[in-house]
Image (spheres, rainbow, N blue to C red):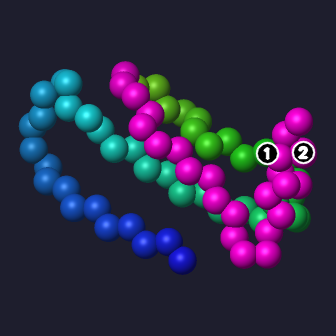
């Protein structure tokens, strides 16, 4: 299970302020055998500090790596 807690305040912020963009997607790669886009439709100035890709129990990450080669 994944748990996430984010607190926020709506206020005016300077342009140099860091923004948080979050997306969560899930699919069963064993059934679809398709590539999944991690980020799309994002067009903002700044850095991407963290991307995460995870596999669940019983999945085969080596199959995904081989498919991407």
Residue at 47%, 43% in the rendered image: 50
Q: Are marks 2 and 1 in contact (CB under 8 Å)?
A: yes
- Specify whether 13 is left or right of 6: left
Which quadrant of the rendered structure holds the N terminus? bottom right
User: Magenta includes 66?
Assistant: yes
Rendering coords of residue 31 (x, y %) = 88, 64
How many other residues sit within 10 Å of disc 1, few (<14), some (14-19) or many (≥20)?
few
Circle 2 residue: 67
Circle 1 residue: 35
Occupied quadrant, residue 4: bottom left
**Residue that sits furthest to the left in the current view:** 12
Alpha carbons under labels 2 and 1: distance apart: 9 Å
How many other residues sit within 10 Å of disc 2, few (<14), some (14-19) or many (≥20)?
few
Which of the two labelled residues, at mark 2 and mark 1, occupies the earlier sequence position? 1
**Residue that sits furthest to the front in the current view:** 62
Residue at 90%, 45% in the rendered image: 66
**Is 69 placed above or below 67 here?**
above
Residue 36 or residue 61, whichever sits in front:
61
Rendering coords of residue 22 (x, y %) = 43, 50
**Is 11 placed above or below 6 here?**
above
> Which of the labelled discs sits on residue 4, or is there none?
none
Prevalent SS, magenta region:
loop
Q: Which residues are magenta?
A: 45-69
Residue 40 or residue 30, whichever sits in front:
30
| SS assignment at label 1 | loop
| SS assignment at label 2 | helix
Rendering coords of residue 61 (x, y %) = 79, 58
- Specify whether 55 is left or right of 48: right
User: Magenta includes 16?
Assistant: no
Residue at 54%, 57% in the rendered image: 24
Residue at 22%, 61% in the rendered image: 7
């Amino acid at each position: 299970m994944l748990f996430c807690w984010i607190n926020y305040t709506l206020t005016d912020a300077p342009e140099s302020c860091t923004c948080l963009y979050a997306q969560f997607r899930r699919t069963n790669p064993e059934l679809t055998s398709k590539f999944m886009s991690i980020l799309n439709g994002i067009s903002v100035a700044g850095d991407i500090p963290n991307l995460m890709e995870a596999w669940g129990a019983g999945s085969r990450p080596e199959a995904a790596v081989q498919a991407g080669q």
